[in-house]
Image (cartoon, grey):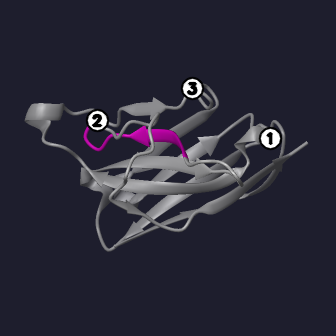
Amino acid sequence: VQLQASGGGSVQVGGSLKLSCAASGFTLDHYAISWFRQAPGKEREGVSCISSRVGSTYYADSVKGRFTISRDNAKNTAYLLMNNLKAGDTAVYYCAADASRPREIYGDSWCPRVDIDYDHEYWGQGTLVTVSS
């Protein structure tokens, strides 16, 4: 079981990047996919999540309106499109997967909360995003 984030790089303020999260060893269909980041000297921060069944999306306030999370189950990959990047977005970005919770209890839109430091089931190596002015 492995998750691999890719697509990071260096970009100027206002620029865009699209990160990918590829899964191997399991299928993402039944997993909620989250992105979180960690900047140097700072605590880990949840960024976004997309649920497995209906693709409900959730965003941290700091990225709302600028980032878009999506998934392509056929490609076993999730994405994070980041627009209008700011210097404060500089961090290592990680993707994570968590098995969906029972529908009869949690409905179709379950995701781990992005506003807390969640103990994700699976996460792998991150990708560095550097935003400079």
Q: Secondary structure at mark 2?
A: loop
Label 2 sits on residue: 54
Q: Residue at x 42, y 55 (%)?
A: 96
Label 1 sits on residue: 87
Q: Secondary structure at mark 1?
A: helix
Position of 101 with respect to 76 (left or right) is left
Label 1 close to label 2 by CB (< 8 Å): no
Rendered image: mark on residue 61: 3
Measured in 3D between alpha carbons, the distance from the residue under mark 1 to the one under mark 3, in whole angstroms, is 16 Å
Q: Amino acid at mark 1?
A: Ala
Position of 65 with respect to 130 (left or right) is left
Q: Is residue 49 magenta?
A: yes
Q: Secondary structure at mark 3?
A: loop
- The quarter of the rendered structure image containing the N terminus is bottom left
Rendered image: mark on residue 79: none
Q: Nearer the viewer, residue 43 or 125?
A: 43
Q: Residue at x 54, y 68 (%)?
A: 125
Q: Position of residue 63 (x, y in %)?
A: 61, 32
Main SS category, magenta section: strand
Q: Tag 1: Cα neighbours inside 10 Å, few (<14), some, or many (≥20)?
A: some
Name the residue furthest left. 104
Q: Earlier in the sequence, mark 1 or mark 2?
A: 2
* Residue 51 in sight in this render: yes
Q: Earlier in the sequence, mark 1 or mark 3?
A: 3
In the rendered image of this protein, does residue 59 appear above or below residue 32? above
* Residue 7 in sight in this render: no
State which quadrant residue 9 falls in: bottom right
Give the magenta-colored segment's residue range: 45-54
